[in-house]
Amino acid sequence: MFNQYIITIGVSTGGPSALEEILPELPADFPAPVIIVQHMPAKFTARLAERLHQLCKIRVVEAQNGARIENGTAYITPGGMHLEVTPQFTIRILQAKEGDQFVPCIDTTFSSIARNADRKKILGIILTGMCKDGVLGLKEIKDAGGITIAQDKTTSVVFGMPKAAIELGCVDYVLPLRRIAGKIVEIVKEKLGT
């Protein structure tokens, strides 16, 4: 189990634009890592990471298997794969199986963080997207003592994932996209006393 603070974001339809609004608002000395699961095919996520890195003060990379997770870095799950965070605070990349409904799977990542993080050191965020991927994982984060955020209906391209999480009762804050980065910084500062 690791005791560092961690932010994780799950997003689908409309995700690149949403990430372009949130990540550039995080300061260069942001004292936590960000793990991102964007529903996207293989080969597209490396380009997404490069584009976001150019726009951001923090570092943005496509996640690599075995990489040690570092503060001030956002990790994009490789398209066509799954990502888990290990108890040693490293990244584990998993091959998708034939028949997997969502690839990458938000629930897989959220669940691994909920299992392996120290209680109350997780901020889970679910953004625009269809279906319900990430909802059960977000509930696990909430049940583990983490804080959770969902994007509101007005600013979501597709309100499926946030709506399902809200209806399940596992969301602490429902916010428009423009307010999410500020809330992330506020929560992390409060939790870390910075």
Image: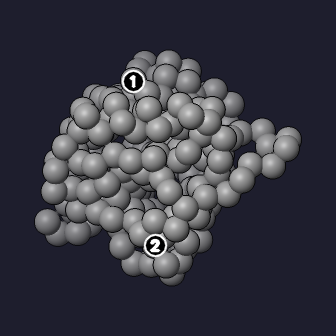
Identify residue for label 2: 89
Residue drawn at point x = 36 percent, y = 73 percent: 4
Distance from the alpha carbon under mark 2 to that under mark 1 = 28 Å
Indicate left or right for 8 with 167 as reference: left
Say whether disc 2 or disc 1 marks the residue closer to the N-terminus: 1
Q: Is residue 32 above or below residue 176?
A: below
At mark 1, the secondary structure is helix
Question: Mark 2 is on which residue type?
Answer: Phe
Q: Nearer the viewer, residue 101 or 179?
A: 101
Colour style of the rendered protein structure: one colour
Residue drawn at point x = 26 percent, y = 57 percent: 72
Q: Residue 180, position in %: x, y?
A: 31, 38
Q: Residue 84, position in %: x, y?
A: 59, 61
Residue drawn at point x = 61 percent, y = 36 percent: 42
Asked if one can make out residue 12 in the rendered structure from this viewpoint, the answer is yes
Residue drawn at point x = 60 percent, y = 39 percent: 79
Identify residue for label 1: 17
The answer to whether the residues at label 2 and label 1 have Cβ atoms under 8 Å apart is no
Q: Residue 166, position in %: x, y?
A: 55, 39
Which of the labelled discs sits on residue 103, or is there none? Answer: none
Indicate left or right for 70 with 131 as reference: left
- Which image quadrant is residue 155 in? top left
Q: Is residue 142 above or below residue 126?
A: below
Question: Mark 1 is on which residue type?
Answer: Ser
Asked if one can make out residue 166 in the rendered structure from this viewpoint, the answer is no
Q: Residue 143, position in %: x, y?
A: 56, 64
- Which image quadrant is residue 187 in? bottom left
